[in-house]
Image (tube, coloured by chain):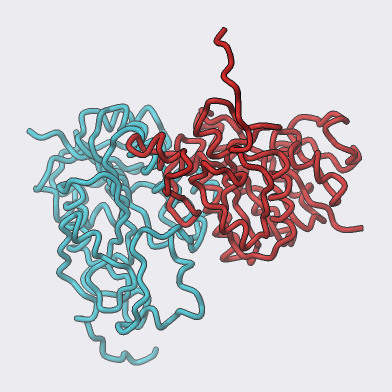
Chain colours: A cyan, B red
Amino acid sequence: MDEPVLLTGAGGRVGQAILSRLADADEWRLLDREPIPEERRHGVPESETVVADVTDREAVADAVRGCRAVIHLAGDPRPNAPWDSLLANNIDGTQTVFRAAVDAGVEKVVFASSNHAVGAYEEDDRTPEMYRKDDEFRLDGTELPRPSNLYGVSKASGETLGRFYHDHHDLSVACVRIGNLTESHPPKEYERGQAMWLSHRDCAHLFDRCLVADYGYEIVYGISDNDRKYYSITRAKEVLGYEPVDNSAEFTFEAEPKE
Amino acid sequence: MDEPVLLTGAGGRVGQAILSRLADADEWRLLDREPIPEERRHGVPESETVVADVTDREAVADAVRGCRAVIHLAGDPRPNAPWDSLLANNIDGTQTVFRAAVDAGVEKVVFASSNHAVGAYEEDDRTPEMYRKDDEFRLDGTELPRPSNLYGVSKASGETLGRFYHDHHDLSVACVRIGNLTESHPPKEYERGQAMWLSHRDCAHLFDRCLVADYGYEIVYGISDNDRKYYSITRAKEVLGYEPVDNSAEFTFEAEPKE
């Protein structure tokens, strides 16, 4: 049996998008700070489930042991989260996961970064034009962070931690700046959300590619192949073999009566 | 009388390089976690000295009040500092200073970043050639961080915090990636140190320019005009009016007998 992949934040939104589609494709160990009910484990046995906070260094070290890779999603997901929570859960928590992974000889860590790491590129004089099909503005992952909020600062710090652990400990690290993850269809009447839509199936496929592909350190954007995109997905395609099947432009919405 | 400039970490090495040359050029308020002895206050009255840790949010808020600018040097300066100290003193401490500055209506924060934010660009196959005069490799401040160590991660995080406070709170922020600050002459027989040498007088002049010039958000390298440089100082010259007078190449050292 293959060594498992540790999925932190497995009970959360991104974790479920991944696990519901990839549960049978890999061996998994699930970590979440809340117990994960059976219907959200998607067949992963309870014995491979760890209830722990990523700020608990000992518990994380135990959870990582014997894993071949980590997908690190855990953290405070609130864009308006208070700094103290971001400092503990997102910055210190991510350091804890990287450190534990290196100590345990894990080969690869996939880190859930966020569009909020670069949200301030959406300047007033570029919006809403940049959310439209004919606009050519692109971010490609080589640009310096410009966070939307302190949550975005915490995600950019996680990316930099990943860079350090790659450069000095030979860990393969992919940072996925996740766009706007929604099930079944993109947000209606929200151009920005359509620009950065990530469908659940493209999300699962992208994280699967991050587990399978060979790379050193990568920052890629996690969005579907939306006509409206201003995030380049070229790097994800070339290095990871990402082949998204969804595009928010395929969804047209009839005007709904105002309530 | 002008509103003062708050100098955090005033008793430290960079603080003293600045204060010893600029004490009379500005009004100052000094903050350090240790009491600053009179000979290191360079004429700044004790009443304008605050003994506090930058992790003490209330004390920092009090210290910033009424200041027109902040030069933020305080933090754990050890390249091998343990993570917990870096998290508290450098990351949380810098957030505390930026937050307090914005809340107090300060116009400008100059943040002491470090060459360690980008030390991993010095890859084995580039060194020692990149430290030599005829090598054309340059970093210019637009590149993503590649920290040497967790200290460098903490400094990169401080830069990103600065970006956030500039973008969202209209604060002018200059991040100075300080090279190798030594008094009177560059390190002997240490090519890297000569490449990134920053003389005390160039250091004081550069921070003075950061206080005087108009800018939005800048990342600049803080080194003298060394022939061996691999950090570009073009941006510091153009935007800040930095005019370094020193160059490590002017110093030649006779071979010293080995002891």
Residue A245: x %, y % from top left: 15, 69
Residue A241 drawn above or below residue B62: below
Residue at 17% x, 55% y is A20
Left or right of A249, for residue B10 = right
Residue A170 appears left or right of B181? left
Instruction: Examine the rendering and report whether any part of residue A53 can be seen.
Output: no
In the image, residue B218 lies at what x, y percent? 58, 59
Quarter of the image for the C terminus of chain B: give it.
top right
Q: Which of the pair A175/B138 is nearer the observer?
A: B138
* Above/below status of B68 relative to A49: below
Q: Residue furthest top?
A: B259
Q: Which residue is at 34% across, 78% downward?
A: A136
Residue A55, horizontal then vertical, whole percent: 43, 37
Q: Position of residue B33 (x, y in %)?
A: 73, 33
Look at the picture and state if A70 lies above or below A204.
above
Quarter of the image for the N terminus of chain B: give it. bottom right
What residue is at 48 percent from the left and 45 percent from the top? B230
Depth check: B51 or A65 in front? Answer: B51
**Total residue callouts:** 0
Q: Nearer the viewer, residue B62 or A242?
A: A242
- Left or right: residue B146 versus residue B79 is left
Q: Is residue A82 left or right of residue B172?
A: left
Kindly tell me whether residue B173 is visible in this rendering.
Answer: yes
> Which residue is depicted at the point 46% across and 39% down?
B132
A105 shown above or below B173: above
Residue B92 lies in what quarter of the image? top right
